Image (tube, rainbow, N blue to C red):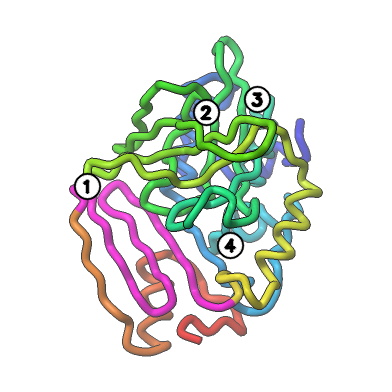
């Protein structure tokens, strides 16, 4: 057993609505990944209130499983990491640079966490990631192989190799944009593993640095079968399953709190101001 106890694993599976088998196989990995992505929202409200969120497994369970809260990449993927280990998977962690909207693959630091999962009986490991939050994020894990397109939850992904100056290949996760017809790089990573201690350092930087976007404005995401919701500062964007997009600006703090609580399913913590 990992440091996620059985009672916490059972509570986690209930929280995400997973009623299938609890064993280390591909069907379970895909099912748990999709259920987590659709059940638990992405949010940075702890950082917005001036504190880095705890990555201790017990605190993650209290917040994401038993509380009406979500989290950002370290919280989501460390919780999934511990749950998958408790189910019998071999898991290691990767760290990536977000390249979506960046000028070059190396213009941003490694601040995103993902998981490499070995599945018994499968020839290739899988990339799992329930903490990216964007429209192009994974809803289902994808095999770590070049030249293979994967579909999961209605989204299509593939990997490409990007040019850079390092000794290891730099892979990019790319998502298919059904509106433009383009493949869009989301984040880039190399193969070396990272540890929970590494993510403690990254988490402190992202969660407390006054230059971090997560400490400066509300940044929330929620994905359902029907649509993807994004709140960036005071701008609410809905992207529907057919690719149609609608955008509106929230009028005041009271409306923002109502939207976050009702549409994102998040209880706003004390001290967090959503509109600055």
In this rendering, does residue 151 appear at all? Answer: yes
On residue 180, which mark appears? Answer: 1
| Residue drawn at x 28%, y 44% as measured from the top left | 177
Q: Provide the secondary structure element on which disc 2 rests.
A: helix
| Residue drawn at x 54%, y 34% as measured from the top left | 171
Residue designated by label 3: 89
For mark 4, does the 10 Å Cα neighbourhood hold few (<14), some (14 to 19), or many (20 or more) residues? few
On residue 248, which mark appears? Answer: none
On residue 67, which mark appears? Answer: 4
* Displayed quadrant of residue 48: bottom right
Asked if labels 2 and 3 touch by Cβ distance under 8 angstroms, the answer is yes
User: Main SS type for the magenta part?
Assistant: strand
Asked if labels 4 and 1 touch by Cβ distance under 8 angstroms, the answer is no
- Camera-nearest residue between 274 and 159: 159
Residue 144 in percent (x, y) is at 52, 25
In this rendering, does residue 86 appear at all? Answer: no
Alpha carbon distance from label 1 to label 4: 38 Å
Q: Provide the secondary structure element on which disc 3 rests.
A: loop
The span shown in magenta is 216-243
Alpha carbon distance from label 1 to label 2: 31 Å
43 over 14 or under it: above or below: below
Q: Provide the secondary structure element on which disc 1 rests.
A: loop
Judged by depth in the image, the label closer to the viewer, 2 or 4, is 2
Residue 68 in percent (x, y) is at 53, 64
Residue designated by label 2: 29
Which of marks 2 and 1 precedes in the sequence?
A: 2
Judged by depth in the image, the label closer to the viewer, 1 or 2, is 1
């Amino acid at each position: 057993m990992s440091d996620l106890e059985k009672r916490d694993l059972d509570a986690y599976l209930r929280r995400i609505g997973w009623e299938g088998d609890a064993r280390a196989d591909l069907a379970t990995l895909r099912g748990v990944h999709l259920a987590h992505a659709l059940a638990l929202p992405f949010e940075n409200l702890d950082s917005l209130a001036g504190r880095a969120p705890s990555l201790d497994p017990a605190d993650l369970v209290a917040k994401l499983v038993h509380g009406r809260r979500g989290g950002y990449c370290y919280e989501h993927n460390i919780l999934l990491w511990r749950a998958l280990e408790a189910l019998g998977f071999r898991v290691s962690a990767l760290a990536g640079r977000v390249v979506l909207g960046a000028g070059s693959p190396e213009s941003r630091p490694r601040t995103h966490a993902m998981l490499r999962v070995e599945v018994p009986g499968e020839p290739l490991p899988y990339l799992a990631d329930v903490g990216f939050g964007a429209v192009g994020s994974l809803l289902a894990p994808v095999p770590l192989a070049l030249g293979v397109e994967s579909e999961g939850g209605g989204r299509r992904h593939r990997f490409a190799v990007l040019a850079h100056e390092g000794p290891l290949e730099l892979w990019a996760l790319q998502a298919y944009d059904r509106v433009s017809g383009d493949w869009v790089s989301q984040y880039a990573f190399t193969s070396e593993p990272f540890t929970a201690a590494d993510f403690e350092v990254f988490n402190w930087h992202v969660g407390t640095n006054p230059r971090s976007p997560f400490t400066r404005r509300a940044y929330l995401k929620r994905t359902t079968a029907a649509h993807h919701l994004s709140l960036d500062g005071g701008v609410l964007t809905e992207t529907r399953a057919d690719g149609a997009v609608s955008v509106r600006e929230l009028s005041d703090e009271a409306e923002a709190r109502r939207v976050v609580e009702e549409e994102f399913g998040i209880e706003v913590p004390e001290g967090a101001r959503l509109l600055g």
